[in-house]
């Protein structure tokens, strides 16, 4: 079910630009209503295209042809206007500050349905289905290590790395080649964001052999 809950916080997308990132967030607030109130508050200057509560209700906040204000200061593959080229989806979750927890099945099922529809409308490559932490690794953690990226990828939304031996690149070069802002955010922050997305069992900010192998597999998929 999709409920219309219009937010005033949006503007025009850049002329001639493509929508080529699907960006997933958690709300990091104590309740769904608190998150909706903030995303629809003109004074807050934040929004997203959609919000999904833990029961699976989808709230439509901003039309997809408008630029919602969800990414903040962010960068991916050298591009800084992430809001201008992305669809933003917020998942209700208290986040690391207020009692981070796993995302319920109903919420994940609704997310899969929504993302599948978004990907039918927009030519978003699988490797550009990202988390907020991927594009803003120095300041964001969401949707975090409890988010089931592997299951989402298995259902056709996003990528999950196949087994692969490292490609010989340095960690910094390999992360930058994939899209991380290593120069701006730093290697440790980018490594931590990578782990939250693609190696969630250990989050220590070190690109060990397992991380490098997974990154090599991802780079092969987008080559």
Image: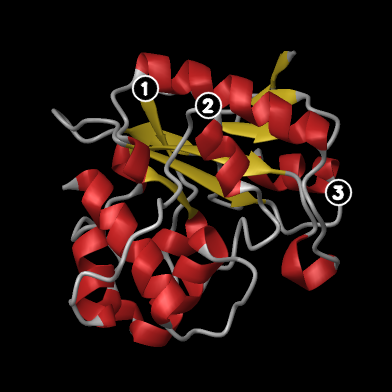
The picture places residue 139, in percent across and down from the top left corner, at 50, 74
The picture places residue 41, in percent across and down from the top left corner, at 66, 43
What residue is at 40 percent from the left and 15 percent from the top?
120
Instruction: Give me the disc on residue 74.
Output: none
> Number of callouts in the render?
3
What residue is at 25 percent from the left and 80 percent from the top?
172
- Mark 2 burial class by Cα count in 10 Å: few <14, some 14-19, many 20+: many
The relative height of residue 210 versus residue 118 in the rendered view (above or below) is below
Nearer-the-camera pick, 98 or 38:
98
Q: In this view, does 222 lie to the left or right of 51?
A: left
Nearer-the-camera pick, 144 or 11:
144
Mark 2 near mark 1, Cβ–Cβ under 8 Å? no
Nearer-the-camera pick, 100 or 203:
203
Mark 1 near mark 3, Cβ–Cβ under 8 Å? no
Disc 1 target residue: 65
Q: In this view, does 199 lie to the left or right of 108?
A: left
Please tell me which of labels 1 and 3 falls first in the chain. 3
Q: Which element is circle 2 on?
A: helix
Tell me which corner region of the image, top left, top right, bottom left or bottom right, holds residue 213: bottom left
The picture places residue 219, in percent across and down from the top left corner, at 25, 56
Disc 3 target residue: 31
Using the numbered discs, state the Cα–Cα distance from disc 1 to disc 3 in whole angstroms. 28 Å
Tell me which corner region of the image, top left, top right, bottom left or bottom right, holds residue 17: top left
The relative height of residue 216 versus residue 207 in the rendered view (above or below) is above
What residue is at 86 percent from the left and 49 percent from the top?
31
Disc 2 target residue: 115
Using the numbered discs, state the Cα–Cα distance from disc 2 to disc 1 in whole angstroms. 16 Å
In the rendered image, the quadrant that contains the N terminus is: top right
Please tell me which of labels 3 and 2 falls first in the chain. 3
Q: Which element is circle 1 on?
A: loop
Scheme of colours in the image: secondary structure
């Amino acid at each position: 079910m999709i409920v219309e809950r219009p937010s005033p916080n949006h503007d025009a997308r850049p002329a001639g630009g493509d929508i080529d990132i699907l960006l997933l967030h958690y709300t990091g607030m104590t309740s769904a209503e608190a998150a909706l109130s903030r995303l629809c508050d003109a004074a807050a200057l934040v929004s997203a295209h959609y919000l999904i509560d833990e029961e699976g209700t989808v709230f439509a906040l901003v039309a997809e042809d408008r630029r919602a204000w969800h990414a903040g200061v962010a960068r991916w593959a050298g591009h800084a206007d992430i809001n201008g080229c992305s669809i933003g989806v917020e998942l209700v979750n208290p986040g690391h500050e207020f009692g981070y927890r796993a995302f319920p099945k109903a919420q994940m099922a609704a997310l899969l349905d929504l993302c599948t529809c978004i990907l039918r409308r927009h030519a978003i490559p699988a490797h550009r289905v990202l988390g907020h932490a991927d594009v803003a690794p120095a300041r964001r953690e969401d949707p975090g290590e409890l988010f089931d990226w592997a299951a989402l990828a298995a259902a056709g939304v996003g990528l999950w790395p196949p087994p692969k031996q490292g490609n010989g690149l340095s960690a910094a070069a390999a992360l930058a080649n994939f899209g991380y802002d290593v120069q701006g955010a730093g290697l440790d922050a980018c490594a931590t964001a990578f782990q939250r997305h693609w190696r969630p069992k250990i989050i220590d900010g070190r690109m060990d052999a397992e991380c490098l192998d997974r990154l090599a597999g991802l780079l092969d998929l987008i080559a």
